[in-house]
Amino acid sequence: MSYSNIEFPEGSLFLVTGGAGFIGSNLCEAILSMGYKVRCLDNLSTGKQENVDLFIGNPDYSFIKGDITELETCMEACKGVDFVLNQAAWGSVPRSIEMPLYYEEVNIKGTLNMMEAARQNNVKKFVYASSSSVYGDHPVLPKKEGQEGNLLSPYALTKRVGEEYGKLYYKLYGLDTYGMRYFNVFGRRQDPDGAYAAVIPKFLKLLLNDESPTINGDGKQSRDFTYIDNVIEANLKACKASHEAGGQAFNIAYGGREYLIDLYYDMCDILGKKIEPKFGPDRAGDIKHSNADISKARELLGYDPKYNFAEGLQLAIEWYKENL
């Protein structure tokens, strides 16, 4: 996808934290393709070395191996930076239930360190990854900013706290912060392996190997699956947003709704497979239904997602067939 309609001053420097991860590496790639400079900060705990190696030799790219839990590292990384895209975090709702203290350390302290470093280095815009998990048990669909329920996991809590700090840093210090409430992002370079892998790459890998995936629950849970290029657009548009739109969080999704069981059979059809899934227990802390109202992001960020679910799924499948 081309982002030529989004322009920044010549020589702009973007810091992408978590730049070796799925979303982060795609952001690095897009910004470099636009002709701007990228500094990537990652400790490679969940990010992958091969995602960093993609850009080796590009004069506009530099890599810092470091941790957002260390303020000094964050300060160094933010020197001379115009825009911060803070993607560094530990994901996964079930893993956060097993490791709440670690999530507090990385996702809350790390995010605060990055905001403070951005403030002290006079960064123009601070765009950070939040999550649809902040809606908790609020039953109303579509999910709308300002209508949040009780949180269901430590992961969700860390993301809510990040948003509250974003609000404070905007009000107290004038730092333009923009929270990206991602809804089930998928696409190229998303890791299919491990106990906490996201559902689309996990299913795809198993189906390509003629194995039967396990669906948690009855498969009747629904998600607003969001193709990676829509997420890249949202982050770039947030870097162009007005000061008045700062200090807020925005739903970043396509605005659709897919049931897991339908998704599974769609994948089987596209791949020409006839494999029945297995069913397992519901995952603790999971939200049953997820569907986003994206009107606020449209209005205040100019967000206009180009890829619907079917188009994104086709592109993702093509990538995994070539790269798995």
Image (cartoon, rainbow, N blue to C red):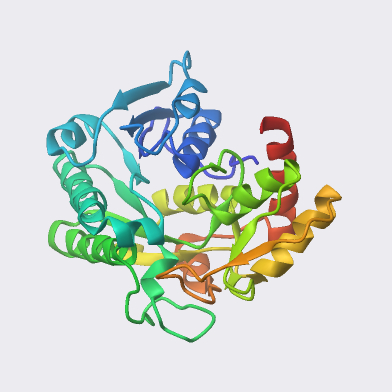
Residue 169: x %, y % from top left: 18, 58
Residue drawn at (42%, 54%) of the image: 238
Q: Is residue 116 above or below residue 143?
A: above
Q: Is residue 159 above or below residue 78?
A: below
Q: Do we see residue 179 in this rendering?
A: yes
Name the quadrant of the C terminus: top right
Q: Is residue 303 above or below residue 4?
A: below
Residue 322: x %, y % from top left: 72, 32
Instruction: Pick the residue in front: 18 or 235.
Output: 18
Residue drawn at (45%, 31%) of the image: 48
Instruction: Pick the residue in front: 234 or 273.
Output: 273
Name the quadrant of the N terminus: top right
Residue drawn at (38%, 76%) of the image: 136
Instruction: Pick the residue in front: 209 or 75.
Output: 209
Residue drawn at (47%, 34%) of the image: 28
Q: Do we see residue 130 in this rendering?
A: no
Q: On the image, which quarter does residue 159 sit in?
A: bottom left
Residue lying at the far top of the rendered structure: 57
Residue 156: x %, y % from top left: 34, 66
